[in-house]
């Protein structure tokens, strides 16, 4: 396994991107960037797409980073510079359970990391249909843009935990 420097973490809401990202960022001695916190303000207003892409170009120029977020439209920016990619391709029910746990933990509202918990019916339908509708697009982007990055496709929380532990060991 090559040295971990730049990690892109992709997956559906509730899949565990933040958990994996925090652990890897701590191992690398860096902070995690949550794209939701970049893209949305505290009132859930979106950043213009060109500004969002520009900020990501600046983020990935660093020598070391961990970035979590799906955002397929700008995924190639992250994939071009990533040394490692973790795609959390978990079942919809697992992701919905993760969202419910997060909602309970934060009691709704804004998290410590700046992400505002905005759960509505459209988001629930997106999560439920992610594997059928979005995951194939993500896989195609991985094939087209991941280059020399080591790509890990994870299909369960147990597998995610094992992989994260393995990646943490390569940093130490």
Image (tube, rainbow, N blue to C red):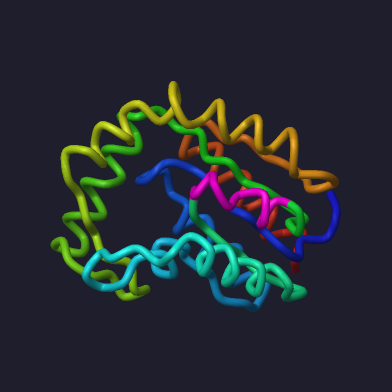
In front of the other: 4 or 70: 70
Q: Using the image, determine if residue 133 lies above or below residue 74.
A: above
Image coordinates for residue 57, horizontal then vertical, percent: 66, 68
Image coordinates for residue 16, horizontal then vertical, percent: 43, 49
The single residue placed furthest to the left in the displayed view is: 107
Q: In the visual, does 61 lie left or right of 124?
A: right
The single residue placed furthest to the top in the displayed view is: 132
| Residue occupying the point 27% across, 47% down | 99
In front of the other: 171 or 144: 144
- Type of secondary structure dominating the magenta stretch: helix
Q: Is residue 146 magenta?
A: no
Q: Using the image, determine if residue 48 lies above or below residue 166.
A: below
Q: Using the image, determine if residue 172 lies above or below residue 129.
A: below
Image coordinates for residue 89, horizontal then vertical, percent: 51, 33
Range shown magenta: 70-79
In front of the other: 165 or 4: 4
| Residue occupying the point 24% across, 59% down | 117
| Residue occupying the point 42% across, 41% down | 12
| Residue occupying the point 66% across, 37% down | 141
Q: In the visual, does 17 lie left or right of 77?
A: left
Answer with the quarter of the image where residue 39 lies: bottom left
Q: In the visual, does 142 lie left or right of 24?
A: right
Answer with the quarter of the image where residue 146 lies: top right
Image coordinates for residue 81, horizontal then vertical, percent: 76, 59
Q: Using the image, determine if residue 47 lies above or below residue 157.
A: below
Rendered-image quadrant of the C terminus: bottom right
């Amino acid at each position: 396994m090559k040295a971990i420097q730049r990690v892109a973490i992709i997956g559906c809401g509730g899949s565990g991107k933040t958990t994996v990202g925090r652990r890897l960022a701590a191992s690398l001695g860096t902070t995690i960037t949550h794209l939701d916190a970049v893209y949305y303000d505290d009132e859930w207003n979106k950043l213009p797409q060109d500004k969002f892409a520009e900020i990501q170009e600046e983020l990935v120029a660093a020598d070391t980073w961990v970035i979590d977020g799906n955002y397929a439209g700008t995924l190639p920016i992250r994939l071009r510079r990533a040394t490692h990619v973790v795609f959390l391709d978990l079942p919809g029910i697992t992701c919905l359970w993760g969202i419910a746990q997060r909602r309970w933990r934060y009691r709704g509202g804004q998290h410590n990391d700046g992400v505002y918990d905005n759960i509505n019916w459209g988001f629930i339908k997106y999560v439920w249909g992610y594997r059928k509708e979005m995951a194939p697009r993500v896989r195609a982007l991985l094939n087209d843009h991941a280059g020399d990055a080591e790509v890990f496709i994870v299909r369960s929380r147990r597998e995610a935990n094992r992989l994260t532990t393995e990646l943490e060991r390569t940093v130490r």
